[in-house]
Amino acid sequence: MKINYFKPSVRVIFYMIIAIVLVAIFIFMLFGSEIAANKMNPQPTSQQIPVSEKVKIFHDNIFVADLHADSLLWGRNLLESTKGHVDLPKLISGGVDLQVFSAVTKTPSGINIESNSDKTDNILYMALAQQWPIETWKSLFARAEYQANRLKWFIKGSQGKLKLIGTKKDLHNLIEKPISEPHVTGVILSIEGAHALEGNLTNLKRLYDIGYRMISPSHFFDTEIGGSIHGELKYGLTELGVEWVTEMESRGMAIDLSHASSKTMDDILSLATRPVIVSHTGVKGTCDNQRNLSDEHIRKVAGSGGLIGIGFWPTAVCGSEISDIVRAIKYVIELVGVDYVALGSDFDGAVSVIIDAGRLPELTQALITEGISDTDIEKIMGGNVAQFFLKSLPKESIEQ
């Protein structure tokens, strides 16, 4: 007897494939972003340092600031406790008074610290997974605008615990707030890479009006503004970049040299009339790799009156313990003085950080244990950042 097995038609097979693809897309959009965020920003595994009651009180009474977090990229609700490195509960428990949030608008596939092209776009997949507005699928400017709007949404939902800082007055009011009042964390908007301008300096005013106050010329690839230390050509500041420096300074927007090529750094430092900042970095003196600052550039940044934010991830400090962060901080102090060093964690930056925002009191404890004076610790933990922005921020108000 001949057995007739069921053979699906071409149409049935086609519909089955479509169904599988749709289910895969649904799962990707529902869980893909969260899975990526947790995998790329793992929880700190460094040994915890016991913090004495005296140090807790000291930490709570000093101004604490961090210069770099990429938390707006990942789609988490920052008002709730999350698996990320930064959220409102961690900012409160860590005593963070000022957090800079940076918008990432494009990164290359196979990202590395040696050489990358601008031909691929990882952030497109993030935008699709998180269902960002359609205009963000192609426009880097729209991605910056969207991430700023996300932060403003968090501010509105924070019941006054987050405040957008865009002017000297905003920051002064934050600093002078009585200790008896509930904790408030000020937030400043930054952008990793001027490719978000899309080659048009008119967009700089638009970003300023949105609330951005700091931008770097490049991120992981060379841009229309200047070369990246991780780019293919690593060139210096372009003609458009020269105009960009002037425009940035005229608006009171800080120039961030993080990720810039050595030539771009030199070009900007020779042109700048205002202090510049390196928001998140390591130093070659304790961790010699392409990502980190040379002694020459440390001296030049300090010579501008600027700041060097020491990162919390292994590539920055060549280690995975709090002592490795302290070692890099001390190196900068010994080279140029305590007035030019700050914290530049790179929280939620697709890296494994040594501590998250909630564990910052441990860093204060480690600095004290190392014998650094209370006065210098106040500067390192945030006093220098406060002074930098009190001088550099504009006077004009921005929309909350």
Image (cartoon, grey):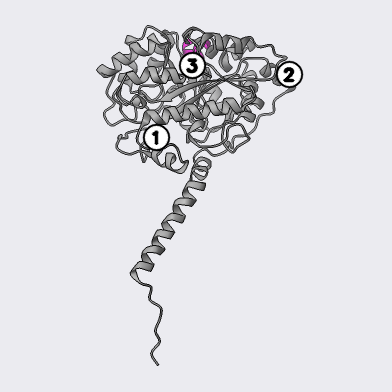
Dot 3: element? helix
Disc 2/disc 1 C-alpha distance (Å): 48 Å
> Is 114 drawn above or below residue 258 in the view shown?
below
Type of the residue with mark 3: Val
Q: Along the polypeptide, which appears first: circle 2 or circle 1?
A: 2
Type of the residue with mark 1: Thr
Q: Residues within 10 Å of mark 2 (few under 14, many from 20)?
A: few
> Is 288 drawn above or below residue 243 in the view shown?
below
Q: Residues within 10 Å of mark 1 (few under 14, many from 20)?
A: many
Mark yes or no: residue 312 visible: no
Which residue is nearer to you in this view: 151 or 313? 151
Q: Position of residue 27 (x, y in %)?
A: 49, 51
Disc 3/disc 1 C-alpha distance (Å): 39 Å
Q: Which mark is residue 54?
A: 2
Q: Position of residue 153 (x, y in %)?
A: 55, 28
Mark 2 or mark 1: which is in front? Answer: 1
- 374 relative to 238 in the view: left or right: right
Q: Residue at image x 47%, y 17%?
A: 308
Looking at the rendering, the stretch of residues picked out in magenta corresponds to: 332-340
Q: Which mark is residue 136?
A: 1
Marks 3/1 in contact by CB < 8 Å: the verdict is no
Disc 3/disc 2 C-alpha distance (Å): 27 Å
Type of the residue with mark 2: Lys
333 is within the stretch colored magenta: yes
Quarter of the image for residue 234 reads top left
Q: Along the polypeptide, which appears first: circle 3 or circle 2?
A: 2
